């Protein structure tokens, strides 16, 4: 196995249909909500360098993309998927770390967030510094929430006036906020010495 985790580009667009199919099959198998995305949507993410793809030679291993909201104040990591043959060996963690770093480097002032029903993703997010939050702490962009319409749990979200769903909202501070917090911590430590 020689898996490479890369920022997706135009040359990877032929994987878009396979990625969408894998997302749909995974959501069905897990019986969880996952917003459906079209191959054109996935291709657009690749064309703008807003996605991570994992490949074993020419074989698709996994994928995840980012999207900005609220005029760049937030960036979401979405659509994390790993092919069945590559599950339970740490691929999801590696892809999630790569997409987290991509989001932070491309949008250093944006808070990073995601919503998920997956316990495994929640665990990975926690390791990366995300904290569970109420939906009121996430972007309020209507377009983001419209993306949930294809999810089987959308009725629950709407019924609860977008305050709760089966998904858990998770939020990590921006790269800029993290650097400020680290600077303050270092300064405080030095002052104590």
Image (cartoon, helix red, strand yellow):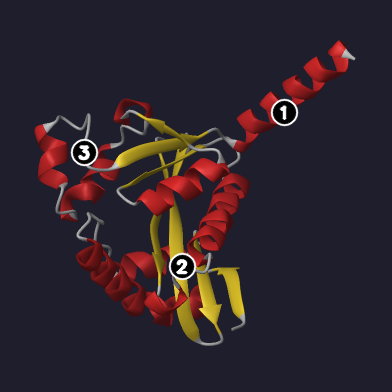
Residue drawn at point x = 37 percent, y = 32 percent: 138
| Quadrant assignment, res 37 | bottom left
Query: Could you tell me which quadrant the C terminus lies in?
Result: top right
Disc nearer the start of the sequence (2/3): 2
Q: What residue does disc 2 label? A: 88
Q: What residue does disc 1 label? A: 182
| Quadrant assignment, res 24 | bottom left
The answer to whether residue 77 is seen in the rendering is no
Tell me residue 84's x, y (percent).
38, 76
Please tell me the numbered disc located at residue 80. none
Q: Is residue 147 left or right of residue 112?
A: left
| Quadrant assignment, res 83 | bottom left
- Secondary structure type for disc 2: loop
Labels 2 and 3 touching (C-beta < 8 A): no
Q: What crowding class fits label 3: few (fewer than 14 Cα within 10 Å), some (14-19), or many (20 or more)?
A: many
Q: What residue does disc 3 label? A: 165
């Amino acid at each position: 196995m020689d898996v490479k985790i890369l920022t997706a580009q135009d040359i990877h667009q032929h994987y878009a249909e396979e990625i969408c199919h894998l997302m749909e099959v995974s959501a069905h198998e897990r019986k969880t909500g996952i917003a459906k995305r079209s191959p054109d949507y996935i291709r657009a993410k690749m064309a703008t360098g807003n996605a991570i793809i994992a490949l074993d030679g020419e074989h698709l291993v996994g994928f995840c993309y980012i999207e900005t909201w609220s005029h760049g104040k937030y960036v979401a990591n979405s659509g994390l998927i790993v092919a069945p043959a590559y599950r339970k060996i740490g691929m999801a963690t590696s892809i999630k770390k790569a997409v987290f770093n991509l989001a932070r480097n491309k949008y250093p002032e944006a808070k990073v967030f995601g919503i998920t029903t997956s316990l495994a993703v929640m665990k990975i997010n926690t390791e990366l510094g995300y904290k569970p939050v109420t939906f009121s702490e996430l972007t309020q962009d209507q377009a983001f929430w419209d993306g949930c319409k294809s999810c089987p749990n959308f009725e629950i979200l709407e019924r609860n006036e977008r305050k709760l769903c089966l998904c858990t909202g998770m939020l990590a501070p921006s790269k800029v906020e993290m650097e400020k917090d680290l600077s303050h911590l270092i300064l405080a430590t030095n002052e104590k010495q």
